[in-house]
Image (cartoon, rainbow, N blue to C red):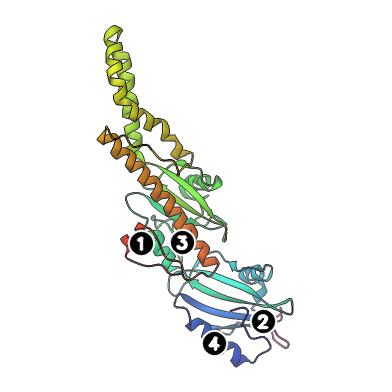
Amino acid sequence: MAAGAPVGGSEEEYYSYVDAMLEMYDDVSAVYVCVKQDGVIYSDGIMTYMSGGWVPDDDFVVTDRAWYSGAAAMDDVYVSEPYVDEQTGNICVTLSKAIIRDGAVVGVAGLDMYMDDLVSLIEGSYKGGSYVFLTTQNGLILTHPDQELALSVDKSTTVADALNGQYAKVCEEILSTKLIWDYAGGPKFAISSPVEATGWDAVAVTSLFGVLVVVLVTVMLTVVLCFALSGLVKQQLTKGISPMFMPLEELAANVSKISEGQLNYHFCVDEQSQEVNALSVALNDTMQKLARYITEISDTVTAISKKNRNLRVKYLWKQDLNIVVII
């Protein structure tokens, strides 16, 4: 869009161009081209042509806008902080890029894009007490199952303000799992992953309370047995019982790897114990789904910043939502 933007054309050419660009994309709410022109009334010498025929007020200074100055200062696409469109209530993001002619920046082309598909993808993770949400480069929470924390027309919340700063600590250490007290009550594990193209973070929160209970019960039983049995009886029974607890003790010893962010760790399955087998499979499945959620969200946000409109959701939550996300 920036490469094809007219420079030195007539007013009709500019408005025809931005309107044509708008019609090409269903998820774009507005398209605009801002170029330097002689004789304009604006103090920065820039005229803004926006789809729909909108004309800025006399005191409008487009160069003061972050999306203009950000794009003019870089070669890549500038991605703004998300905001809520007052007319539709949809979450939007502005993408802009410098218009360069003969090696010089002569203006900026931009568009406002709805994030409905991405929001739907994230909201699909709100199941069983586990969820994923996005935070921007400045720590703004984009979506969240708690509507008091989610971005809206009337309010916005940062990770520093939410849950007494617990989310902020999660985002400070990338790919390091933190134990938090969730907004809905109860302990949960949270882990963040960066989206390099935008500087945002994808934060995944999951409940492993059941696993912790199993580990706690295992440790308690082991302690009780050790103190209750004595002498030869203790020795004989310990020899017979210890092998029964070894698989659970091995699980308990390695659960800490989750808190260290080692989501690629694989718990060994004990074929001789159905209970341990089921617990190992559940742990492996939980970590794989958590890693996939983070990867999927990161890839989707990266695709938005790079204008990749062919990315499709790959994993199981796509089937749960019964949608196909196309950026």
Q: Amino acid at mark 4?
A: Gly
**Label 4 – label 3 distance at C-alpha:** 29 Å
Q: Residue at x 36, y 35 (%)?
A: 212
Relative to 281, does residue 75 appear above or below in the rendering?
below
| Sequence-earlier tag: 2 or 1 | 2
Relative to 324, does residue 8 appear above or below in the rendering?
below
The quadrant of the rendering that contains the N terminus is bottom right
Q: Is residue 291 left or right of residue 215?
A: right
Q: Residue at x 74, y 80 (%)?
A: 102
Residue 156 seen by the camera: no
Give the image location of residue 137, x and y in percent: 57, 57
Asked whether disc 1 touches disc 3, contact meaning CB atoms under 8 Å apart, the reply is: no
| Mark 2 burial class by Cα count in 10 Å: few <14, some 14-19, many 20+ | many
**Label 1 – label 3 distance at C-alpha:** 24 Å
Give the image location of residue 225, x and y in percent: 30, 18
Residue indicated by mark 2: 35
Residue indicated by mark 1: 318
Residue 87 seen by the camera: yes
Q: Which mark is residue 151?
A: 3
Q: Which residues, given as a range, are shown in magenta?
A: 37-46
Residue 45 lies within the magenta run? yes
Residue indicated by mark 4: 53
